[in-house]
Image: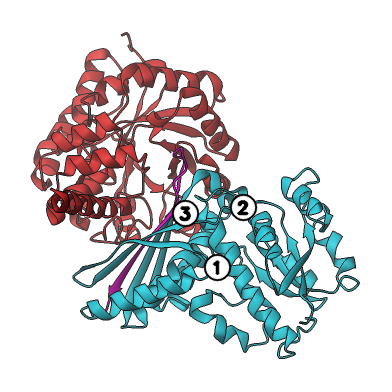
Chain colours: A red, B cyan
């Protein structure tokens, strides 16, 4: 693979996707410290939001240590060169949240829908594209679930509403490089030349770096990752590792490998509540194609009801659950308890 | 027996057409007009086959006929964006508006919670909240009538096939209107609503999760009984309204996991989200129709 001279824009997820791994409990100090260090390391884009996007604060997804407003107001003014982005899922957040973050100074908004449901984002993408200086990204989640041609139709909808960049989002960490090449390549050929293409990976099958390289080769310019992989499931593409690979391949990424290594080692790893690795449950996420942020919710339900978390995750995969359906986890666990009792009674 | 109250349905999409099927069975209300904007729509064709008068010229195609056809109640199954205009035009003619969009100009109505109370008021516009609201607010209310609820949160998951263009364009209005009703009618001090659209095939039956955070330790027995009573109330007009799991008690959290299967009138049974709206709207209109027939409620042309 020859990527020499290609340019990529990296987008750090450790303070948004990483919120899942931290049960949304990252402190304001940690946010500011890490964001400032990333800014100094040359990271062009840094996402700061509840793990499930703006207004994700809920029983369903978890109440965060601070509001989106508090996090963004703390981080945005401290940035010297980095742009701070926010994530918005229609159905959870509304255009009121979009206006709120614009007022705080957010100039990259990422509007996420399930990969088949782009039309729920028309209001939000439309309004964002009218905001002066706003970079508007459409984020097609769980992109492994549908064929490339169908995914392209949804991408074109988002483009038509006003998005200037469209992502193939591998929320379940279930994609393999050939699939990434096919989907990104189709986007690159069929979307407008000025529309950027991006890839968001998870490491559940150990493929996040290979997938991200395939994405660049196929025409993606924006690549998401997290320093030390801090993110849902087995984490996102670990940025310090990815940047080392990009350096070796002669890709222009504009960040400082050594500073990123220090952030990983000195700031992120010490604050992890559990190792971010491909444990049995994360592997099941990737293998069965389940939304990565279900991981910790499933572990908690398993513990509460005396079940195996991997069994819960497999069931959620069979039911074709999508991002945001965290409420199904306890429901499925309760069903499994009933089944166990029924089996016990008949035995 | 006195004559049925004559009604018009505005909107010939999924909701309007399903409503038509249910209204055909009503002993109190007779559907007379079906209003659409697309001459090719399936809903208009079916309405014509069933003997209704139809127009594809929107509410303006209906208004000139309101008096001669003695239309007393109109149902708006279009979208929040056009509801205000539709409501103004029919209210001017003295027609009561039952609003199935999330526009929420008039007071919210969740039948087992506040229909009786609304009956005594001379309102000209009643809002049916949202499908998620109809499915979940009764459960929040079932908890809050036992003890104070500091926070009520609902997650409504509907199948992709049952989420029409109106719902999709109105998704923000859905969350706002539903969370508003969780507070105002459900009785939660703070309300939150989340909607998820799932494209799985075969389509999933509408699911709703309700979380309440009570101010004090929940009285488990009283809440359990109140929830079961409320499920039975809703089942009177939506037989497929089912408490799948719960109530689960975890500290001050009380959670209910519901499934809503429709009657399968126009759309398949999985679309319980549409069914619960149309069934609730018809139940609401029937109550007003009874009041009208008894002369206790005389809709007045709005200025």
Q: Dot 1, how many residues are within 10 Å of its Cα: few (below 14), some (14-19), or many (20+)?
A: many
Q: Quadrant of residue A233?
A: top left
Viewer-nearest of discs 1 and 3: 1
Q: Identify the chain of the residue marked 2, using the numbered disc in the image.
A: B
Query: Residue A147, image x and y in percent?
Result: 46, 24
Residue on which disc 3 sits: A98
Query: Residue A154, image x and y in percent?
Result: 52, 33
Secondary structure at numbered mark 2: helix
Asked if one can make out residue A232 in the rendered structure from this viewpoint, the answer is no
Residue on which disc 2 sits: B166
Please state the extent of the stretch shown in magenta in the rendering.
B196-215
* Mark nearer the N terminus (1 vs 2): 1
Secondary structure at numbered mark 1: loop
Residue shown at 59% from the left, 84% from the top: B118
Is residue B212 located in the magenta-colored stretch of the structure? Answer: yes
Using residue A22 as the reference point, say whether residue B141 is left or right of it.
right
Q: Residue furthest top?
A: A2
Q: Label 1, label 2: how many angstroms apart (C-alpha)?
A: 14 Å
Residue on which disc 1 sits: B129
Secondary structure at numbered mark 3: helix
Q: Dot 2, how many residues are within 10 Å of its Cα: few (below 14), some (14-19), or many (20+)?
A: some
| In the rendered image, the vertical position of residue B125 relative to residue A320, given as above or below | below
């Amino acid at each position: 693979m020859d990527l020499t001279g290609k340019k990529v824009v990296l987008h750090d997820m450790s303070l948004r996707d990483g919120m899942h791994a931290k049960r949304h409990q990252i402190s304001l100090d940690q946010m500011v410290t890490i964001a400032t260090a990333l800014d100094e390391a040359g990271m062009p884009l840094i996402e700061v939001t509840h793990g499930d996007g703006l207004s994700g604060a809920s029983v369903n997804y978890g109440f965060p240590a601070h509001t989106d407003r508090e996090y963004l107001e703390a981080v945005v003014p401290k940035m010297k060169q980095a742009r701070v982005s926010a994530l918005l899922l229609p159905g959870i957040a509304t255009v009121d949240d979009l206006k709120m973050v614009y007022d705080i100074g957010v100039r990259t908004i990422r509007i996420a829908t399930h990969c088949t449901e782009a039309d729920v984002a028309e209001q939000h993408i439309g309004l964002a594209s009218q905001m002066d200086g706003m970079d508007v990204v459409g984020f097609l989640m769980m992109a492994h679930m549908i064929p490339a041609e169908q995914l392209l139709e949804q991408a074109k909808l988002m483009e038509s509403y006003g998005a200037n960049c469209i992502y193939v989002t591998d929320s379940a960490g279930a994609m393999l490089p050939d699939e990434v090449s096919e989907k990104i390549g189709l986007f690159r050929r069929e979307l407008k030349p000025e529309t950027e293409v991006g890839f968001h990976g998870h490491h559940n099958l150990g493929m996040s770096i290979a997938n991200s390289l395939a994405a660049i080769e196929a025409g993606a310019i924006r690549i998401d990752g997290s320093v030390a992989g801090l993110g849902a499931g087995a984490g996102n593409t670990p940025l310090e590792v990815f940047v080392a690979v990009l350096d070796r391949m002669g890709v222009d990424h504009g960040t400082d490998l050594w500073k990123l290594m220090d952030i990983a080692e000195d700031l992120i790893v010490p604050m992890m509540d559990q190792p971010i690795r491909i444990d049995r449950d994360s592997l099941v996420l990737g293998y069965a194609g389940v939304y990565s942020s279900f991981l910790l919710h499933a572990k908690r339900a398993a513990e509460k009801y005396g079940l195996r978390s991997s069994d819960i995750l497999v069931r959620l995969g069979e039911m074709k659950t999508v991002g945001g359906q965290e409420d199904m986890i306890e429901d499925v666990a309760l069903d499994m308890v009933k089944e166990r009792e029924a089996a016990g009674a008949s035995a | 027996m006195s004559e049925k109250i004559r009604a018009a349905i505005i909107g010939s999409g999924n909701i309007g057409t399903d409503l038509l099927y249910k209204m055909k069975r009503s002993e109190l209300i007779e559907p007379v007009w079906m209003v659409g904007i697309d001459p090719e729509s399936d809903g208009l064709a079916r309405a014509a086959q069933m003997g209704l008068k139809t127009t594809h010229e929107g509410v303006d195609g209906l208004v000139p006929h309101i008096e001669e056809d003695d239309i007393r109640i109109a149902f708006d199954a279009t979208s929040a964006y056009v509801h205000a205009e539709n409501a103004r035009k029919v209210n001017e003619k003295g027609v009561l508006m039952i609003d199935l969009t999330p526009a929420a100009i008039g007071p919210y109505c969740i039948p087992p919670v506040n229909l009786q109370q609304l009956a005594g008021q001379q309102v000209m516009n009643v809002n049916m909240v949202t499908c998620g609201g109809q499915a979940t607010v009764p459960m929040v209310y079932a908890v809050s009538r036992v003890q104070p609820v500091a926070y009520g949160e609902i997650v409504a998951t509907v199948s992709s096939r049952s989420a029409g263009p109106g719902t999709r364009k109105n998704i923000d209005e859905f969350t706002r209107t539903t969370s508003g009703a969780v507070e105002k009618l459900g009785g939660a001090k703070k309300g939150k609503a989340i909607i998820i659209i799932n494209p799985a095939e075969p389509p999933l039956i509408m699911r709703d999760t309700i979380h309440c955070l009570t101010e004090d330790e929940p009285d488990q027995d009283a809440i359990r009984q109140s929830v079961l009573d409320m499920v039975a109330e809703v089942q009177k007009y939506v037989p497929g309204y089912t408490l799948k799991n719960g109530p689960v008690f975890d500290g001050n959290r009380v959670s209910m996991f519901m499934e809503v299967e429709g009657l399968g009138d126009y759309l398949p049974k999985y679309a319980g989200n549409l069914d619960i709206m149309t069934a609730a709207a018809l139940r609401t209109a029937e109550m007003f129709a009874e009041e009208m027939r008894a002369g206790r409620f005389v809709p007045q042309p709005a200025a």
